[in-house]
Image: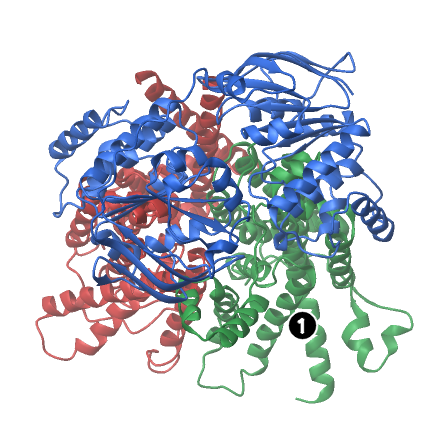
Chain colours: A blue, B green, C red
Amino acid sequence: MQVELQSIHKSFGPVHANAGITVTIPPATIQGILGENGAGKSTLMKVLSGFIAPDSGTIFLDGRPVVIQSPADAIGLGIGMLHQDPLDFPPMRLLDNFILGRKGGLFPDRRTTTRQFLELAARFEFHLSPDAYVDTLTVGERQQLEILRLLWCGAQVLILDEPTTGISQPQKEKLFDTLKKLASQGMTIIFVSHKLEDVEFLCSRVAVLRQGSLTGVALPPYVTKELVQMMFGREIALSAKPPAGPGGAVLSLTGVSLEGARLLIKDVTFQARAGEIIGLAGMEGSGQSIFLSACAGLHRPVSGSIALAERDATGRSHHYFKKHGVAYLPAARLEQGLVPGLSLSDHFVLSEGIRGFFIDRRRATRLAEDRISSYNIKGGPSNTVESLSGGNQQRMLLALLRDPLSLILLEHPTRGLDIESTIYVWAKLRERCAQGTAILFISADLDEVLQYSDRVVVFFAGRVSPLLPAESLSVESLGELIGGKGWDSFGKGAAGG
Amino acid sequence: MNGELILVGLAGVLTAAAPLLFGVIGETFSERAGVINLSMNGTILLSAMGGFAVALATGSVVLGFLAGAAIGGLVALIVAFASITLRQSQVAVGFVLTLLCRDLSYFLGNPIMGETGPRLGTISLPVLGSLPVAGTLLFRHDIMTFLSFLLTVVAWIFIFRTRPGLKLRGIGERPAAAYVRGANVNLLRYLYTVLGGALAGLAGPIYSLSVKAGWKGTISGLDGIGWIVLAITIFGGWSPFRVALGAYLFSLLQWLGLVLQPALPGIPSQVLQVAPFPLMILTLLLVNIGNAEWVERSLARLPAPVRRAVARALRALNVTPPAALGIPFQKE
Amino acid sequence: MAEARVSHALVQIGAVLLALLLTTLVLLASKAPPFAAYANIVLGAVGSWEVIANVLVSWVPLLLATAGLLLTFTVGLWNIGIEGQITLGAIFTTWALRVLQASGMNPALIIAVSFLAGIMGGALWAMLAGALKTFGGVNEIFGGLGLNFVATALNLWLIFGPWKRPGVASMSGTVPFDHSLWLPTLTAQSRLSPAALLVAILSIALVYSLIQGTYFGLRLKAVGKNPHAAFLLGVPTWQYMMASFALCGVFAGLAGAVQVTSVYHRLIPSISSGYGYLGLMVAMLVNFRASLAAPVALFFAALNVGSIQLPIVLKLDSSLAGVLQGTLVLFVLFAQGARQRLLKGRSG
């Protein structure tokens, strides 16, 4: 089925997510949609799949204009979307997830459906058990379930939104095989991603979005530099890293084991030194988040000990860590790090931990103005924190950091930020480094990890690599480690100082 | 306390539990869809009064029950409107309505207090009713008690075995996922909330037309029943058979309170009457204890095999609410 | 900004009018004369100095309960257990009075000690609900409800058991205390105690300044709006929740103490008189802001007292007051929601 999007516009308040996008996708192709975070890819696909309605523009299927007001309409027309976090029902069984959404009689025929499910699964060599509960599956398996379900519901257009985030390498290879097979059988596949290699490998055409507009369409053979140019508008210059002058150990983990919802990190020994930046890399769900939380005192280790400088901090609360110079910045800025409804100056008052009973309003405003100007935040002291943009919220989180700190832990510090804010954030963090603060950060962006870290730790399915000097890694080698390859050279997964 | 009396007493427990069953099954539907109807206490009072009033005026018990269901559905509609369309807190609107409906029932029911109205008659099933033990216990009841048995079974089959039931569970667990599969989430939430309210609206008239016939205003003894219904819905893990068990347990406790009265002269009768309420609600502590953070912390300190056994036990006791309960569904 | 204020006020007025309309319809459905009923309520509330004094008597515990609830609402909790907290305050006050009444201590001192006991009782009961929530994971609505039932059972047991009147236990409560242990009133006839009035007014003022002007209040607000972020910012969240429960219990205990020492002079089965639940309604109506709590509570107290004569004069149940109060809060909730939806629609 040929899909044509004409002049699609969609705004969310002041943000013009899709600014007049026109693109034609021929049938039986794998069309790549490339662009960085916030380029408008997800919005466009949500419009196509009926999740949201466009402000203006038309969609044509096989040349006929169609109206898609809801996901039900889209499904009826044969358009199915696999969301980045598959929209399934975790506490229910696979078969129930499969049945839900397909029209039928009052009593679903479980036996026939099971048979059809197993046949479909066998066709694509997916090993899924209909009776298993979805919350026991990996992300890759949940994707497989969704793909089967969409096919069973008669999808002729399959949209995949960032499907390769969080799945293992073998699962990715299987996914790509499946997609190629489906395309050869006549299905139109739209592959949305910000990962160059995946798109270059898989897609027969690529459309690139940047800041809400279509910047270009490319055909194979792809030239990476051109795609990068279309994605970012300029070439990214990797700025020179000032050499780190590491000091004494600020954080030491000895024989620490952590238990998460679905994984086990066993027996990690690790040290972070003053003034150094350590990047934690790995697919989402490989253990970095739990590890970072443990370093903040937010997650108790099952065994082992944690020490801050010389002080034993094992089993202590997060506030103890805070008292001894540790700060934690969560990825969900507004949901977890800031208090919607309170003003900027309220936040500064809270974080200062000022003693006393009555609030000194003038002092609070002065403090707020001071911080706002030094961190260049676009907002006034009495503005509420939810009125700030994402970039300014991150600046706010940085501005709330006390001085001095021995360790800053950041979870995805630049996720969703524009280039300018990203550069600003790292400049501020480097300033702290120069003062002797150690920094641990999680990032899904391999370039960012390699560009800013002195040393890198890679996580894969709960295994923790030793501390690797950043110069010894390249994007490819790091990617391989993240994907689970090349771990044998480490021996038993222990990290050394 | 001879056998015959015990049998009759236990049959009475089943009868007294019938209104509770209508309430808890109704609330189970509503909460499975994601909406808490905290107005339950007021709804039961208002539908009891209203059902009695209509039955009194028309002489028809059937019309009384229909009126009760209509009242319950209407109140639930208000809850649904305020929480789904206006996106206000379900707790807030439910709490206001529970007080408002209670006061409405006292005010509008004032003129008919103490009147004698029509009552539900007892039916004895043809052959089964004459059975020695089971007959008295199970097969000689009024129609609403029989319906309460049926309702429990039908509700279970619907929720766990049918396609629309699957959709219902989906809406309460992850409305976004249901939405992309074509479900009109908010409409269905309205439907199930109103259905739940209508079922609860049948509970009230069972009291005023059968169990505690008539309308006695503030001394009707009905104030508080609605809260128990809400607690049992949680205790029963939003599953029809389990919540029915909770309802029977509460009824049993009430009956025991009456029965043990002469045996416990030291305890005033008023206290024994009230006792089942706190007992019932404090059982929530058991089903919720696995969630507490300090429990997780103490668990972490136990050796591995012990830890896993304890965790499994807690998980079996534990009940997880529908994940989207109380959270309005917004598309963007 | 001014436009928003005007639209806000209009919307509130609209809600009040709708509430009046609905209540009038209820009256008509009940074949009762609406104007006569309203007139009766107004007369019953302001028609004589005596009734005005009664309104103030009713205002005191309501205002105290509301003041305490504003604290728990700030931290994001629905302290439905407030009724039981008032009851326990009354029980502890009665207990202290019973123990000390024959001791020969200065009566003023006895009353003071009994007030302290009442505060302790209310705070204890509130912290129990708080502990159930913090350590037991029990939702404060059901924990509070359960404790309300326990408090009622305890109250009944005391009145019909160990503390019963000699001879036959009675629904009219325990033996009334000697006049010397009565809180001094304005005149011999009224039950209005200037001391109690002062305590209530000071309480709401205290709560207002606590929430608006102190670091404690700011931290409460932070916990209420985003507990996780507040925790990361360094606020010990569970301690602040417990503190808000304890403080609310203090005010609830005060309300219970006032009920015993200045209104009923004994323990009765319905000692909390629904002031707890009514306080929740007042708090909701003022959108959890302390500045309007006093006048709104006064209005609700006036409605309650004003409708006392309804059964006698018009043969109507006095729960009409509750109907008015309930519809008012309901429509204000609606109005709030409608405004939010409309505003959102406009800004896209």
- Residue A5 or residue C323, whichever sits in front: A5
Residue A44 picture location, percent across and down: 59, 21
Residue A454 picture location, percent across and down: 32, 41
In the displayed structure image, the side of residue B272 where residue A326 appears, left or right: left
Classify 10 Å Cα crowding around label 1: few (below 14), some (14-19), many (20 and above): many
* Image position of A224 with respect to C154: above or below: above
Helix, strand or loop for disc 1: helix
Q: Residue at x 17, y 76 (%)?
A: C100
Question: Mark 1 belongs to which amino acid?
Answer: Val
In which quadrant will I find the C terminus of chain B? top right
**Residue tagged by mark 1?**
B13
- Location of residue B34 (image quadrant): top right
In which quadrant will I find the N terminus of chain B? bottom right
- Residue B91 or residue B163, whichever sits in front: B163
Residue A497 picture location, percent across and down: 32, 55
Q: Residue at x 49, y 17 (%)?
A: A229
Given the current orientation, which residue lies at the most extreme left position?
Answer: C106
* Image position of B308 with respect to A153: above or below: below
In the displayed structure image, the side of residue C64 where residue B149 appears, left or right: right
- Location of residue C269 (image quadrant): bottom left
Q: Residue at x 50, y 58 (%)?
A: B218
